[in-house]
Image (cartoon, rainbow, N blue to C red):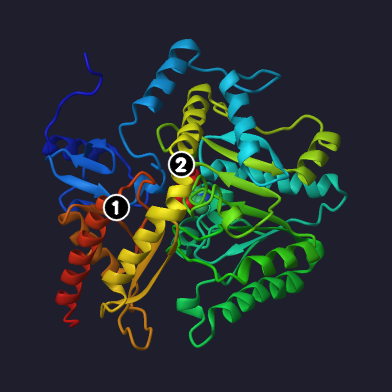
Amino acid sequence: MPPIPQRDTAAWRRIDAAHHIHPFTDPQAMAAGGGTRVITRAKGVHLWDSDGNRLLDGLAGLWCVALGYGRAELAAAAEQQLRQLPYYGSFFHTTTPPTIEIARLLGERTPPGLDHVFFGSSGSESNDTIVRMIWNFWALEGQPEKRILLSREYAYHGSTVAASSLGGMSNMHAMSGILPGVAHVMPPYPYRYGQGLAPEEFGRRAADVLEQRILELGPEHVAAFFGEPVQGAGGVLVPPASYWPRVQEICRRYDVLLVADEVITGFGRTGRWFGCDTYDIRPDFMTVAKAITSGYLPLSAAVVGERVATTLARKGGRLAHGYTYSGHPASCAVGVAVLRILAEEGLVERTREETGPYLERCLHQAFDDHPLVGEVRGVGLLWAVELVQDKAAGKLFDPVGEVGLRCLAHCFDNGLVLRAVRDAMCFCPPLVITRGEIDEMVEKARTSIDQTARELGVA
Ligand SMILES: Cc1ncc(COP(=O)(O)O)c(C=O)c1O
């Protein structure tokens, strides 16, 4: 007897509207659009909804399903672990073999010096873990006044209280305010902030803004800087090559801990195992989640560098922090299988050498001359096409975001899932995507952007 009853779309929608509060959704807008879309099955890079429509998933679920859908090996890893030991936690001197194994494998894969792992179930949780560890670290080091956390506008670090404060999304701040002692600086977003400057010059300036802020706040008060190697949910903001080296230098100069949030960029997305490898970043912490299990089960980790790990181990005593599902054995077993498949199928190299460059070429070919497109930017298999009001002047739409949503609706109607961030159409397909599927994705995006342009009267 299957646990989930069979219902038609209308019935699912009625029940959903009555009972289900959706994340990042306006219920009135959803109702006006006819109700929720119900996804019922998936295979490879394609999804099917409850009306039988087939969609190409150009966003890998929510930037997470790196290995694509329907991977029997991952289902088998979960099933085997659920049968043998479905749950045991890591509190009070216990743990399980898959938890230890994935901690070891992560230590092997992450950049040198990042060898200690604390598990959670989401990127948000792991960022909150890191915040608590940072404050604890500075207190143990005799500098309890080092409490301020810096991050960037348009950053996304999650939805818990600390993570949403760290994020630079004004609508999230408007909902519930932010923690005191969190400040945001300009992101490396040349298309918006750096017009007229060469990208490398702008990258250095964006880093210098961080330095100015640290000096204004007083380095003795600044605990850490959080940054995604490439800002994903902020609209795929790809930093100029000059940005990260300068940011690292500044963090070192003022003894500000550096946190690389790799929740989207981790596990091959940028063409190397981590964004930190692509941009040569040596952080004090890394946050990983999403593709660590390819989205099949929830798992995240705060990866802790040597300096903090040593202080916590020597001076911290009993760590007063933990989640029931820290190191969940089934999630960790799936994670071990994902890391193995990524390596065995050479998906990181394939993203760097084949599919990433192919997507890059296709997007430039389709959109460089398009009158509605201001910029095509990205790295690996993480890209955005920014729609603008005036291509020649590089002018964004005002208000921002409406055209992106309109284009997204066309994408769905044409059988393509993307994400509209403001007016940037974001691409983050499963790493297993083939050239033929990339053609299909770009062609559908082109049709949808053409339709949007026609409606706006843009020739
Ligand atoms: C960079 C980054 N950090 C953190 C998060 C939050 O992760 P979660 O939704 O698993 O809490 C996200 C989610 O999109 C993210 O993109």
Tell me which residue sits at (60%, 33%) in the image.
105
Q: Residue 346 carries which label?
A: 2
- Quarter of the picture containing the N terminus is top left
Residue 326 on image: x %, y %: 58, 29
**Which one is nearer the viewer's eye here, 283 or 24?**
283
Residue 306 placement, left or right of 397 = right
As displayed, is residue 334 above or below residue 241? above
**Disc 1 beta carbon < 8 A from ligand 1?**
no
Name the quadrant containing residue 32: bottom left
Few, some or many C-alpha atoms within 10 Å of disc 1 (few <14, some 14-19, many ≥20)? some
Which residue is tagged 1?
A: 435
Q: How many marks?
A: 2
SS of the residue under disc 2? loop
Say if 315 sits above or below 400 in the image.
Answer: above
Give percent across and percent down for residue 409.
Answer: 21, 60
Decide: few, some or many residues near mark 2? Use Cα within 10 Å; few <14, some 14-19, many ≥20: few
Q: Residue at x 17, y 44 (%)?
A: 54
Residue type (three-letter) at the residue carrying disc 2: Gly
Q: Which amino acid does label 1 sit on?
A: Arg
> Going from the N terminus, do you reach mark 1 or mark 2 first?
2
Residue 435 position within the rendered picture, expressed as x and y whole percent measured from the top left? 29, 52
Along the line of sight, the residue nearer the viewer: 99 or 212: 99
Residue at (40% x, 57% y) in the render: 356
- Of all residues, the one furthest to the top in this rendering is 84
